[in-house]
Amino acid sequence: MTLKRCWTVLLLLTLIELSACAEVQPWERGRLAKPHMALDADPLLSSIDAHTYNSKEAASGGNGPAGGGCGCN
Amino acid sequence: MLNSATRLFWTLLLWACLHLQALAVQPGGPAPGFELPRLDNGETIRLSDFKGKVVYVDFWASWCGPCRQSLPLYEDLQKRLPVGQFQIIAINLDEDRKDAEAFLKRHPVSYLILSDPEGISASAWSVPAMPTSFLVDSSGKIANIYIGFEPSHIGTIEHDIKALLDSTAASHPD
């Protein structure tokens, strides 16, 4: 088998594998929107912790990405 | 290795895949339509049943925060506008219809609630986020799309609906 043919087979296999990457649609995120699926189990406690941390460090932000990916506003 | 015809086929296939998004539902284009059961009594409702009316199609779910805010406000909106010319249809996309029923028990609405747990209509209408609403004119074309919801949006939505109702009345004077 030539090298080019190997690359073609590899490319085709990669494309076939990609079909397994299913996108979760906005209306399929009901389970992700449940409270126990939240990345932050206790937002109030985290907020208080962050306030203490920011006061001690004299800097704020950069704590993580915004949103949990529910597709809401 | 690959002859030119095969290469052309793969290129066209890739191009078609990349441009599927271009076929998405957009203002000015025809509304895809639906045929879904009512949540309360199972009666089948089609978008085509409302031809000649301005229809506001809202895709919602009980787990979606902005949707929960929007439904009671749409109830007020439906009451302010003439039922003979305007209809709100809210398509529920909860996987378990009991979740929707529990929400509607707390916040009852008089407009049509349809059930689509499989999300077939949401897929056909290319719903990009929850909630998304489509304002459909009396000829079945999409006049406007509203992605997401905040209570402050209701004024704009009402203004758009009234403008559409006025233009419908002007083009079809009785």
Image: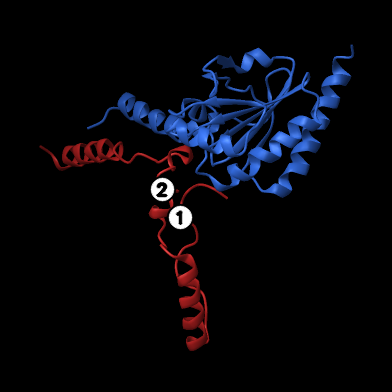
Chain colours: A red, B blue
Q: Residues at badges 1 and 2 in contact (C-beta under 8 Å)?
A: yes
A37 in relation to B123, above or below: below
At label 1, counting other C-alpha atoms closer than 10 Å, the crowd grade (few under 14, some 14-19, many 20 or more) is few
> Viewed as shown, does residue B52 lie left or right of B124?
right
* Location of residue B74 by image quarter: top right
Query: Which element is circle 1 on?
Result: loop
Q: Position of residue B95 (x, y in %)?
A: 42, 33
- The residue indicated by pointer 2 is A32
> Viewed as shown, does residue B21 lie left or right of B8?
right
The one nearer the camera, B17 or B146, is: B146
Mark carried by residue A68: 1
Number of numbered callouts drawn: 2
Residue at the image point whose x is 59% and y is 39% from the top: B106
B17 in relation to B41, above or below: below
Amino acid type, mark 1: Gly
Q: Position of residue B20 (x, y in %)?
A: 48, 31
| Chain to which the residue tagged by mark 1 belongs | A
Q: Quadrant of the N terminus of chain B?
A: top left
* Location of residue B18 by image quarter: top left
Any part of residue B120 in sight: yes
Whether marks 1 and 2 lie on the same chain:
yes
